[in-house]
Amino acid sequence: MLKEKRLLQTLDMLRENGEVEISHLSRLFDVTEMTVRRDIEQLVRAGKAVRSHGGAMLAAGPIGIQTSQTVVNLESKLAIARKALAFIKQGTTVFFDSGSTGYLLAQCVPASAHITAISNGIAIVTELVTRSFVSVIMIGGELKAGSLACRGPAAEDALDRFRVDLAFLNVSAVGKHGELFTGSVAEAGFKRKILAAAQRCVVLADSSKIGKQSLCRFADARETQALITDDGLGAQQLEMLEQIGTSVIIANR
């Protein structure tokens, strides 16, 4: 198998599973373990992987100015991102909301995906544009320091032009009655525009955000089709979300 094809398949396996083993790749590709190590070293130099004992793990990469060491609840967010991948169908238009979980989801998108991707996050579009069959549209506007995401009236006006099959929405908190919060007044209008533009909307929120409040309420979970979280969600919190009519998906069960 050609080296370029091995690298693409290895990267797809990293995106899907989060890690790979050298011995497994050696058998799969029918090459020596030394050859696999050289392949992994190339992915490490490109910032796509980090070495682990006996193999490699997917590198979290830059999320705004964040790294894998500074992303809060990284493992939970990775599990949520991998579960969310199942919602993406070939030939569809998908909006990726800016934020750490949205970026991790973008990392999980396989090289073979044929989609149109729209995002207001610089890190997300930079990640997705490396895939040959993904058409990428960047939403411009006021650029937020730190997250490197566009927002404000210009971004809202730009999003008005689009209709998407599926949107992944990041939130700062999900209230005890299913309220969706953001920590920025400037982002609230943009997130409402995401809901209006999407035929289906899926909320990505790790369990630390459930049952909490933040600065600005912009919508309710009942306006979305699903909420993906992790198994840190309590029984009462799960019951609350199910009672308001949203489909709750636990990523790591």
Image: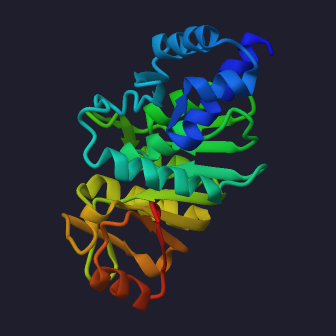
Residue at point 41% right, 91% down?
243
Report the quarter where the N terminus lies. Answer: top right
Looking at the image, residue 244 lies above or below residue 174: below
| Depth check, front residue: 147 or 5 | 5
Residue at point 46% right, 81% down?
222
Toward which corner of the image does residue 205 lie, by quadrant? bottom left
Total labels drawn: 0
Answer whether residue 217 is visible to the viewer in this image: yes
Q: Is residue 78 left or right of residue 139?
A: left
Q: Position of residue 91 (x, y in %)?
A: 78, 49
Toward which corner of the image does residue 207 lie, by quadrant? bottom left
Q: Is residue 232 left or right of residue 136?
A: left
Q: Position of residue 15 (x, y in %)?
A: 56, 37
Residue at point 35% right, 47% down?
75
Answer whether residue 138 is visible to the viewer in this image: no
Q: Position of residue 150 (x, y in %)?
A: 40, 40
Toward which corner of the image does residue 40 lie, by quadrant? top right
Tell which residue pokes out farthest to the bottom in this image. 243
Residue at point 75% right, 32% down?
133
The scheme the figure's colours follow is rainbow
